[in-house]
Amino acid sequence: MIKDILKEADMRMHAAIQNLDDDLAGIRTGRATPALVEKLPIEYYGTPTPLMQLASISVPEPRGLLIKPFDPSSLKGIERAILASDLGLTPNNDGKQIRLNLPALTEERRRELVKVVHGRLEECRIAVRNVRRDLHNDMRDFEKEKLISEDDLKRGEEELQKITDHNIEEINKHGQHKEQEIMEV
């Protein structure tokens, strides 16, 4: 029973870290990457649709993205969504495709992005701690219902804390890596 709880803890915490990775991929660094825009919601026939489902996104040069819509009628919607986003990019539309040129990041903008990264890291840490709290409460309930012994509860709590510490450390590594990536000129 404790093993099942620990497996669930590891899976749920790993899912939180995976979500963090996806989040961090969308934060702009000095290089162009399709992850910056692929999840951008585009109004397509009245439904918000991720850009990656509407167009192919390529990186023809280090500071530029090329977006080729599968349906030419979606070009205006894509352009509108990019302008409305907080990316701070101006799309260049030639009627068939959109080019995005990424300007070099200023020192001030880099520091702002690092603050955003720290906020996302803290959200992920909170998610991991919430998983620990929920499963710890489950273990206590099992002990109250006499499904597990007090010794099993203690061992389970220690293992759960080890898993939590490991995942928090993993989050910190991801954060340091992203911070270095952002501050790299």
Image (cartoon, grey):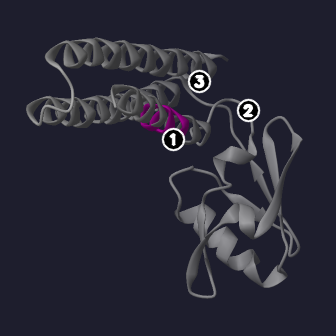
- Amino acid type of the residue tagged 3 in the rendering: Ile
Of the two numbered discs 2 and 3 on the same chain, state the one appearing first in sequence.
Answer: 2
Which of the marked residues, 3 or 1, is nearer the chain's N terminus?
1
- Which is more toward the observer, 32 or 127? 127
Q: Which residue is mark 2?
A: 31
Circle on res. 19:
1
> Can residue 96 be found in the magenta stretch?
no
Judge left or right: residue 164 versus residue 28. left
- Of helix, strand and loop, which one carries label 1? helix
Q: Is residue 101 above or below residue 136?
A: below
**Dot 2, crowdedness within 10 Å: few (<14), some or many (≥20)?**
some
| Residue 184 versus residue 104 in the image, above or below | above
Identify residue type, mark 2.
Arg
The span picked out in magenta is 12-19
Identified by mark 1, the residue type is Asn
The C terminus - image quarter: top right
Q: Quadrant of the N terminus?
A: top left
On the image, the x and y values in percent for residue 153 come to: 21, 19
Secondary structure beneath disc 2?
loop
Please name the residue shown 44% across and 20% down the image.
Answer: 167
Instruction: Give the spatial CA distance, label 3 vs label 1.
Output: 19 Å
Q: Residue at x 79, y 66 (%)?
A: 55
User: Mark 3: which secondary structure?
Assistant: helix
Quadrant in the rendering for residue 131 = top left
**Residue 120 locus on image (x, y percent):** 41, 34
Whole-percent x, y for residue 177 in the image:
58, 17
Query: Do the residues bearing badges 1 and 2 touch, measured as CB atoms within 8 Å?
Result: no
In the rendered image, residue 17 lying in the magenta stretch gets the answer yes
Q: Which residue is mark 3?
A: 182
